[in-house]
Amino acid sequence: MQSISLTSNHAPRRVFDPAVALSVLIHEASSSTSRSQSPFSPPKSKAEEAGERIHLELRQKITYLRDTAKSSYTEKRYKDSVAMYTEAIILHTNNFTSLPKPLKNPTESEALASMYGNRAAGLMMLGAFKAAANDCGQGLSSIW
């Protein structure tokens, strides 16, 4: 690869390497938090932006439900905890119509397995052992 020398009366001699410049541009584009997309991709349609906004709101609601369910469990309000984990699982799976694929999206699969496991803990505290065992099986099947 050929480098180009740049000289100036006021600046020290610098060497421009196009490969380094390209890698810096790619790194800045991929690590920038102020941009929602790559500068090399076409602009998003309003429908795509709305879909992303809805997805973000859904993720925030699931996170809120999980956090609240966890607090309910630690406060020994097991029925509330089970109900909130159930709602979070329903939202996470789009009313059980869309299950994450473990190999394609391990983070989503692990989150679902965690919710099933935590709901199983609440069910065990309520004495619903068969339902808890079923949730354990569902959690394991979501990651395998």
Image: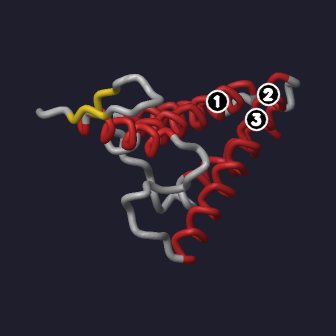
* Circle 1: residue type: Asn
Q: Quadrant of the C terminus?
A: top left
Dot 1 surroundings within 10 Å: few (below 14), some, or many (20 or more)? many
Total numbered circles: 3
Q: Are marks 2 and 1 in contact (CB under 8 Å)?
A: yes
Looking at the rendered image, the disc whose residue lies closer to the viewer, 1 or 3, is 3
How far is mark 1 from mark 3, CA to CA? 11 Å
* Circle 2: residue type: Tyr
Q: Is residue 51 above or below residue 80?
A: below
Q: Quadrant of the N terminus?
A: top left
Q: Is residue 48 above or below residue 28?
A: below
At mark 3, the secondary structure is helix
Q: Quadrant of residue 76?
A: top right
Q: Earlier in the sequence, mark 1 or mark 3?
A: 3
- Residue behind mark 3: 67
Taking the spot 60% from the left edge, 36% from the top edge, the residue there is 115
- Residue behind mark 1: 118
At mark 2, the secondary structure is helix
Q: Quadrant of residue 95?
A: bottom right
Relative placement, left or right, of 92 versus 9 is right
Dot 3 surroundings within 10 Å: few (below 14), some, or many (20 or more)? some
Looking at the rendered image, the disc whose residue lies closer to the viewer, 3 or 2, is 3
Dot 2 surroundings within 10 Å: few (below 14), some, or many (20 or more)? many
What numbered label is drawn on residue 93?
none
List x then y, in percent, for residue 140.
43, 32
- Residue behind mark 2: 73
Relative placement, left or right, of 102 versus 135 is left
Please tell me which residue lies in front, 28 or 79. 28
Relative placement, left or right, of 95 versus 15 is right
How far is mark 2 from mark 1, CA to CA? 9 Å
